[in-house]
Amino acid sequence: MNQEQLLKHFDRIAEAPDAVPRLRRFILDLAVRGKLVEQDVNDEPTSELLKRIAAEKARLLKCGSRTKDRLMKAIRFDEQPFIAPMPWQFVRLGDVLDMINGRAFKPTEWLASGLPIVRIQNLNSDEAPFNFCDPDAVQERHLIRDDEFLISWSGTPGTSFGAFIWRRGLAVLNQHIFRCIQIGGAFRAEFLRLAINSQLDVLIAQAQGGVGLQHVTKGTLESLPLPLPPLIEQHRIVAKVDELMALCDRLAAAQNKREQRRDRLVSASLHQLQNEEGLTPRRQDAKEEKEVDEKTLGVLASWREPVFLQDMPRLTTRPEHIMALRQTILNLAVRGKLVEQNPADLPAPLSAKALELAPDSLPSSWRYSRLEHLLAEGTRNGYSRKPDDASDGVPILRISAGTVRQDGIVAEEEHKLISGIDSATRVQYGLISGDLLACRFNGNKSFVGRLKLFSNYLGINPIYPDKLIRVRVDPALALPGYVRLAGDSDLVRHALEDSCATTVGNWGISASNLKEVPFPLPPLAEQHRIVAKVDELMAVCDQLEANLTTTQTDSRRLLEAVLRDALAPALEAAACRIQ
């Protein structure tokens, strides 16, 4: 494989999701298919390895180490996972390994010190703590020493199944792990581990059990077909895999270093953007000018986006970067740093009683008030009867209508039908365009109290369920679209989550507590400008996400092309030998 080519293109390849893990899997797949190193006609043929396996089985049977020889079925062509190179053959795992299960320990047998008990988590991580047991209570057959071959056969699919070589000293096996004794020495242990682990998907597909704990039976493992290359070729394959995995380690380290540096840059830039003064030119109001003069118009005309936003396509290389940018836009919007202030704008006509002590960061023309003072009418919880899916029923939103969309809009497709709704009830629990809905209860705290805007884009005029709260703002004070985005800002969201309570795993907020949350309130004219600017910038974020998806797709294709090109000579040589 051409390492220089991989390194040359890795900056682009690394943008593919899971680039390095995919490269590792690709290397593993090539290794066990005979496409990673060349075959050598001078290597000892696999037929000799099969003879040694048969001879060892006969010896064990004769000396009584085996009471009988388990006859494995011949491997059909359709069972072979791929077409192996000519010198190779397939054998079943049960032909080359005897598997002895670990001991079933009870938690009452665990000690603070003694002989380490190897559980599945100890195979998957060197950091996992050991349990211990009394060494005198353990049979020799359950002990393992360095270089023992192990197979875990039970656990969570994708994280627990697999083959391992133990190299952490004397220990004892817990159940669900086989200690494996090789018959005939036909496999190098490191290649055998690669061969088994390359077929984990096959094993997982045959696993038994529920959604959580599953297991692969001993019979399934014994019948697994494995490729058997000449022994000396196995050594070459293992050396090549080690070399390429070391390359992957370096690529992963370089990628992590670059991503950490990029994350720090994005974080620092967003922090500076939110906290730096003067990002948005603003008129000083010391003179309290009564008219918008030509100087003011000049300032407004010369205002432009912060330079940072122009750099975002280069910096936003992961979805979480764009998520952070969206949040920053909202935070700027509710602090008066996204659009200019106009001295001619009149503050919201709130009474002195409605005003709260405003944060210093808010412009002087803004107000700070609890949500209850911005309402056209009182909040209302929804209709409590469950839907019955009556064909002639009235649409009633599901709770998910207030949570599934990420753009702040009520998902009107999320509805059912309910019968027996008269006109008075429909008015009482009906929705009009511009209403806001907030989720009262949810297992995810981030959904609770989050405002969604109802726009009636389906025209179905639904009612809403009792797990949602209707909020109808006074149009003379606030735009529903502004209240919605302000509710997603850190300034409001932190206060709102402080008002949430948890019971039996669910988070909740009452309508009365929701109304107590303070909101920053610009003049009505500025609210219009803020909503328009946020919509514009969120569209930019949408485009960044689309570009990111395209970049990742292109990077994935480049990775596959580079691998094909790097392997083309070896594949061509193999094809010639087969012909």
Image (cartoon, rainbow, N blue to C red):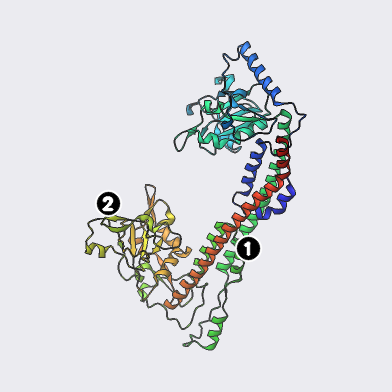
Kind of residue sitting beneath label 2? Asp
Residue lying at the far right in this picture: please name it: 42
Q: Nearer the viewer, residue 205 or 276?
A: 205
Residue lying at the far front in this picture: please name it: 579
Q: Element under label 1?
A: helix
Q: Quadrant of residue 429?
A: bottom left
Residue 162: percent from the left, percent from the top? Answer: 58, 34
Q: Nearer the viewer, residue 114 or 224?
A: 224
**In which quadrant will I find the N terminus?**
top right
Residue ID for mark 2: 388
Q: Nearer the viewer, residue 577 or 215?
A: 577
Asked if residue 77 shows in the view, the reply is yes
Q: Nearer the viewer, residue 393 or 523?
A: 393
**Which residue: 69% across, 23% down?**
47
Disc on res. 6: none
Kind of residue sitting beneath label 1? Arg
Q: Residues within 10 Å of mark 1 (few under 14, many from 20)?
A: few
| Position above or below: 504 against 229 | below
| Position above or below: 462 against 352 | above
Q: Quadrant of residue 304?
A: bottom right
Residue 387: percent from the left, percent from the top? Answer: 28, 53
Q: Residues within 10 Å of mark 2 (few under 14, many from 20)?
A: few
**In which quadrant will I find the C terminus?**
top right
First-in-chain label (2 vs 1): 1
**Which residue: 45% across, 81% down?**
345
Q: Element under label 2?
A: loop
Residue ID for mark 1: 314
Asked if residue 114 shows in the view, the reply is no
Residue 119: percent from the left, percent from the top? Answer: 55, 31
Of badges 2 and 1, nearer the viewer stands 2
Residue 103: percent from the left, percent from the top? Answer: 53, 24
